[in-house]
Image (cartoon, rainbow, N blue to C red):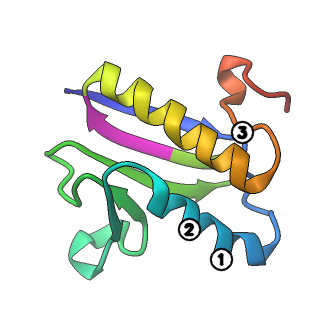
């Protein structure tokens, strides 16, 4: 397994209603949804997780950063690419605008 990372063009300053209601529903639609980490997760408390809360196992974790919605994880490359495609499609449909990685030229800044 390899360390994985992506940053999506979902800005931290979107309307609070979107972050409170819409984005959590999007998280739940991603394959492997586990839930929001509890206090046992330490610094990751409250962050959404997929597959596992254990960082030494296959997992994905997301956080809201100034540059966008940031995902990190540990998984095989092919599985990661498939998961990325799935979550980008789900978010694009739900938010109604093109979601992608600015760094890869998928969307404009």
The residue positioned 62% from the left and 64% from the top of the image is 23
> Is disc 2 in contact with disc 3, using a CB cutoff of under 8 Å?
no
Q: Is residue 51 left or right of residue 60?
A: left
Q: Is residue 54 above or below residue 1?
A: below
The local secondary structure at tag 3 comes to: loop
The foreground one among 25 and 76 is 25
The foreground one among 24 and 53 is 24
The C terminus - image quarter: top right
The spot of residue 5 in percent (x, y) is 45, 34
What's the magenta bit mostly, secondary-structure-wise?
Answer: strand
Q: Residues within 10 Å of mark 1 (few under 14, many from 20)?
A: few
Distance from the alpha carbon under mark 1 to that under mark 3:
18 Å
Residue at the left extreme of this rendering: 56
The spot of residue 15 in percent (x, y) is 82, 71
The residue positioned 70% from the left and 55% from the top of the image is 94
**73 in the magenta segment:** yes
The residue positioned 27% from the left and 71% from the top of the image is 42
> In the rendered structure, which disc, 1 or 3, sits on the residue that comes first in sequence?
1
**Residue 99 shows which numbered tag?**
3
**48 in the magenta segment:** no
Residue 76 visible within the image:
yes
Depth-wise, is mark 2 or mark 3 nearer the camera?
2
Q: Magenta stretch: give its range.
A: 71-75
**Residue 25 shows which numbered tag?**
2
- Give the residue at mark 1: 21
Q: Is residue 77 left or right of residue 28?
A: left
Distance from the alpha carbon under mark 2 to that under mark 3:
16 Å
> Is disc 2 in contact with disc 1, using a CB cutoff of under 8 Å?
yes
């Amino acid at each position: 397994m390899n360390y994985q990372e992506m940053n999506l063009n979902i800005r931290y300053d979107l309307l609070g209603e979107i972050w409170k209601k819409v984005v959590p529903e999007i998280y739940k639609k991603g394959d492997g949804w586990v839930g929001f980490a509890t206090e046992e997760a330490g610094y990751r408390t409250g962050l959404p997780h997929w597959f596992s809360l254990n960082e030494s196992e296959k997992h994905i974790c997301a956080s809201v950063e100034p540059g966008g919605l940031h995902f990190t994880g540990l998984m095989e490359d092919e599985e990661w690419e498939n998961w990325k495609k799935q979550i980008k499609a789900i978010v694009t449909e739900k938010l109604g605008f093109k979601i992608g990685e600015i760094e890869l030229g998928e969307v404009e800044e």
